[in-house]
Structures are given as C-alpha cells and as structure tokens.
Amino acid sequence: MKKSIFLFISLFAFSLAFSQDKATNTEQMKWWREARFGMFIHWDMSSVAGTEISWSRLGPKPLDIWGDAAGTGGDSIYDNLYKKFNPTQFNARKWVEIAKDAGMKYLVFTAKHHGGFCMWDTKYTDYSIMNTPYGKDVIRELSAECHKAGIRFGIYYSPRDWHHPDYGMGDNSRYETYMTGQLTELLTNYGQVDVVWFDSFGKGESVKYWHADKVLELVRKLQPQTIVNNRCNYFGENVPSLKADFDTPEQTIGSYQPTRNWESCMCVVEAPKGGWSYRRDGKVKPFAECIRNLVGCATGDGNLLLDVGPDPAGIIPSDQAGRLAQIGEWIRKYGFTIYGTQGGPFRNGKWGGGTFKGNKVYVHLYESAPDTVSLPALKENLVNAKNLSHSNVKASMSNGKIKIISTPADRHSPDTILELTFNQNVTRIDN
Ligand code: GLC
C-alpha cells in the first residue's frame, strides 16, 4: 500500500521532473510530434529467465529510485544469465518490419537497463552481448535497419546501474566517466540517433555529485538533432535549465496537456509485477484497449511508446506481433486521424476525445460514452459531419455548441470516429 502511494507520487513527479516547454527544440521535435506512435523494446539477457528486466535481479539496488538500498553483492543467477543468451533468431529487419506495419514511426531500444548489461560492442565493460554465446552487436543491426527503413532510431540508457561497482561510489566520478564514455560510443558509432531516452539517476548520498547537465550537454553536442526525455536527472527532480524535450508518464495515459510535449510508455503485455521485458507469465492486452491507449494519447496531445518484449531466441512473440499487426490494420484506415494532428481542440475525457488538423476535427467516441456528449463551443462554424465508422452517430451544432448524439448500438469498439469539417482552420480552445 505504502509502495503504491509512493509509486503514484513518483509517477506524478516523473511527469514534472526535468521540466520543458514546447518552445524547446521545436525544430527537432517536429517529426516526433507528427509521428504520435513508436515502439519501445525492452530486451536483454533477462529474457532467458522470462522475468522483469533488472527489477527481478535479487540483491541490493544501490541508489534505486526508492533511495539507498543497503547491502552488497549481486544475484549469482541473474548476473550469469548472459552466458546462456544466444538469440540466434534475432532479425533486426523483421523487428523493424513489425514496427512499420503497426504504424509505428520510431523505435527506442534498451541499450543498457538498470541491471547494467550492455547490448552493444562497448569497450568499457565485458558485461555485454559480445561475451554471450551470440557475440554480435544488436544495436549495430537495429540502427542500420531503422535507418534503411526510415524508422527513427532511439536508445534507452539507464543512468542507474546496479551491476557497476563504481555506480554511486564516492563522488561517482569513475562511474560518470564510464557512462559518458558509453554514451559517446552510442552517439558516435551508430549514425543518427533520434531519441535518447534516459531512465533517471538514483537517490541517495551521491546524487549531489551527479552532473545531469554535463551529460545532457554531451548528448546535444554529439547529436544536435536528437531529442531527450525528462529522466536524465535523478529521480523526480526538477531542473528547468536542463530543458528536456518531453515528459514520460509511465503505464498510464497522460492527461490532456497541450503546453508540454509528452509520451506515455506502456507495455503491450500485462504481467504480474510489471511487464517490461519478455515475460513468461505475460498476457497481451486486448486490441480495443491498445487502440484506446493510442487514441487517449493522441487526443490528449501526446505520443504512445508501446513496448514489446522479444523472447530469448530474439523473436517478438507471435501474440505480441499479432496484436501489433491488428493495430496496423486499424492505423491504415484511421491513421490520418492520428498522425500529424494535435490533441483537442477541446479536452478529452472518459467519453473519448478529439484530434484536429486544418479545418477538420476527428472525434473519437468510445463505446462507453454517454448518448449525448456536449462539447464546448469553438470559434469556427461546423459545416459538415461525416461518420467514418459507418454508424449512426451524429454531430450537430447549435448556439455554438457541438453535440455528439448516439445510441449504445451506434457506438463501436474500439471507437467510432466522426470527421467534422469547419468553415476555417480550427483553433484550440481553453477548457
Ligand atoms: C521504469 C522502470 C523500468 C522501465 C522504465 C520504462 O522506470 O524502472 O524498468 O524500463 O520505467 O519507462
């Protein structure tokens, strides 16, 4: 109970941490704002055990987000999984194809998670994929395939490292040298990196030595076009001067927020105690829920980064890939109501929400919506309402107010979409 309240407060803090506003890197953010939908991939040798990435490692987690966890030593089972990691079926082209077919425009891959295992050829540690029976640099292949396919490529890098003996030790300088060296490798040897997705430094004594600003400076120097999330700093801490490019609500749809960029990261797999990574006990979320998550983000003016967890052989399991293919089918029909739109022009809600572009507003109505939804008045006049889902849901406007009227039988799962055309370009209203 205590932990869940803390988690709630922490998630809230995450969204405030490392603040940014829309003025930040507007040029660099352009493609990302239009993309709306990306693939997160949590994958490393933890897939051999089929348990939660890093968090299933027993033993102390120095400087974790809950504060210092005392103790020494690691987990002799978890820390040796890499010796059995041999993903001979890994095929970067296939993964990128799955992402592309799902309508995802970018991909973010765990280069190093909190457990410290490195998925590329790094000269800074032996604890890497190069020393598994597989012995090949998967980031090399994945980045190359993304570049070829026109999918934006991003890396996830955890500043927390529960495996590294220098992490959080003394003034943390040895670890910082290690980390900046690794970031330099990642941002120099793999061509263009479009997103750098950090996952916060820990808490505890040594945070006072943590130089998030220097790390960020390095990233921006090495890849000036890249964009960075709001977790470069230590957990929950707000450093406005650092200017992150986007907020990161986790496992939840972010709330309507047109003033700051945001991206919800959510797992396609639901599992007890998490779902980040390949989970033997995981269950893929229903199709309708996945669509509502995407629509919920788009109508709130945010992105969705949907996570998959490939298996130890290197395959994105068929239940996950199958769900993504279904999402892709939906996107091919209705993607124009998502890509390149803004969330709004009015606040979304439990009933659904809107996206808009030019003189069009796309209303996404959920099955659970009430029979009448009254929307606040827009400045523009409604000239036409078209139902894109072939049902009888209707829209009318009188005294400036728009009403969406339907019966339960008219409302489809995962949503019913109306295209409203106005006499001129629509502007966002403050509500
Ligand atoms: C969290 C978790 C981690 C996951 C990440 C994704 O902070 O520690 O396991 O990778 O969020 O958002």
Image (spheres, helix red, strand yellow):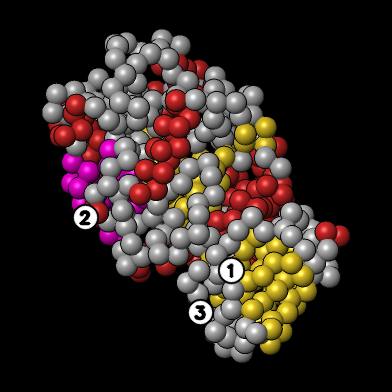
Q: Is mark 3 within 8 Å of ligand 1?
A: no
- Residue 321 seen: yes
Q: Is mark 2 within 8 Å of ligand 1?
A: no
Disc on the earlier residue, 2 or 1: 2
Mark 2 sits on what residue?
241
Disc on the earlier residue, 1 or 3: 1
- The x, y position of residue 291, in whole percent, is 66, 53
Residues shaded magenta: 211-234
Up/down of 59 relative to 286, above or below: above
Up/down of 21 relative to 14, above or below: below
- The x, y position of residue 213, in whole percent, is 20, 47
Name the residue furthest right: 409
Type of amino acid at the residue the image marks with label 3:
Thr
Of 109 and 342, nearer the camera is 342
Mark 3 sits on what residue?
427
Type of amino acid at the residue the image marks with label 1:
Thr
Q: Left of 93 or right of it: where is 182?
A: left
Type of amino acid at the residue the image marks with label 2:
Ser
Residue 219: say if magenta.
yes
Mark 1 sits on what residue?
355
